[in-house]
Image: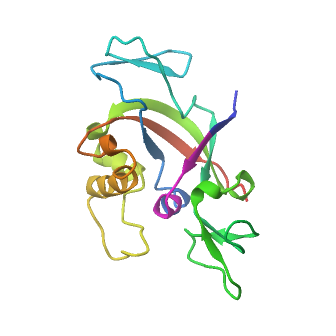
């Protein structure tokens, strides 16, 4: 049964551009709270929960749901006013609003009706961040650097992924940096046709 999950992923502008080009087909999130140990993983065959080898008996529910579930994506956007206002466009797009005053809005303020990306979950698994392969870094959209500020910079895929991951998690969740090697949810997805 297909269902829209309450999880709203926030994608950076680089993630959005990679997803739209078909380069980003995976997304990782830290497992919260971190399991005490990670020696082996048991995935329930029909439910969406996992247990880790820490003998705590704690079951972790996947935020990505089951294969077939759908997740909508938030991204930074432009509006006609700072706190409210008419939707004007997406920050990830090369064209910015012209001929009028506009404001850049945080992705967290995007409503469902303005979201253009809907993901269908194909697979969910758990791994340590250090277990990521070069192929998986490519699937995270790190084939090339898509940041507007660094158009000529290309990095090896794993290095680019580590840079993006630490930029996202270093300030808010210090124990989730690449060097901390957290346990993460890995979601493989397909982008559904544009919803706008």
Please tell me whether residue 27 is drawn above or below residue 113 in the rendered image. Answer: above
For the point 64% across and 57% down, the residue is 109
Query: Dividing the image into 4 quarters, which one contains the C terminus?
Result: bottom right
In this image, 104 relative to 151: left or right? Answer: right
Q: Nearer the viewer, residue 128 or 31?
A: 31
The outermost residue toward the front is 83
In this image, 63 relative to 114: left or right? Answer: left
User: Magenta stretch?
Assistant: 7-16
Q: Judge whether residue 75 can be spotted in this image.
A: no
Q: Judge whether residue 78 can be spotted in this image.
A: yes
Quadrant assignment, res 38: top left
Quadrant assignment, res 122: top right
For the point 41% across and 49% down, the residue is 139
Query: Magenta span has 14?
Result: yes
Q: Nearer the viewer, residue 130 or 172?
A: 172
For the point 71% across and 59% down, the residue is 114
Q: Position of residue 39 (x, y in %)?
A: 27, 20
Q: Tag count in the figure?
A: 0
Q: Position of residue 141 (x, y in %)?
A: 42, 55
For the point 46% across and 56% down, the residue is 23
Please tell me whether residue 39 is drawn above or below residue 34 in the rendered image. Answer: above
Query: Dividing the image into 4 quarters, which one contains the N terminus?
Result: top right
Q: Position of residue 21 (x, y in %)?
A: 52, 61
The outermost residue toward the left is 179
Q: Position of residue 174 (x, y in %)?
A: 32, 45
The outermost residue toward the bottom is 99
In this image, 88 relative to 76: left or right? Answer: right
* Color encoding of the figure: rainbow
């Amino acid at each position: 049964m297909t269902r829209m999950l309450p999880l709203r992923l926030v994608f950076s502008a680089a993630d959005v551009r990679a997803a739209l080009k078909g380069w980003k087909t995976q997304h990782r999130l830290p497992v919260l709270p971190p399991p005490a140990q990670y020696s082996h993983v048991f995935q329930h065959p029909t439910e969406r929960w996992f247990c880790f080898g820490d003998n705590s008996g704690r079951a972790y529910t996947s935020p990505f749901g089951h294969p077939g579930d759908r997740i909508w994506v938030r991204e930074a956007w432009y509006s006609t006013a700072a706190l409210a206002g008419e939707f004007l466009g997406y920050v990830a797009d090369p064209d910015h609003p012209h001929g009028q005053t506009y404001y850049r809005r945080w992705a967290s303020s995007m409503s469902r009706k303005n979201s253009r990306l809907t993901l269908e979950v194909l697979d969910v698994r758990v791994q340590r961040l250090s277990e990521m392969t070069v192929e998986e870094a490519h699937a995270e959209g790190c084939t090339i650097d898509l940041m507007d500020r660094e158009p000529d910079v290309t990095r090896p895929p794993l290095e680019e992924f580590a840079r993006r991951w630490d930029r996202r998690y270093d300030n808010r969740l210090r124990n989730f940096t690449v060097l901390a090697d957290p346990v993460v949810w890995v979601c493989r997805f397909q982008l559904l046709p544009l919803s706008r």
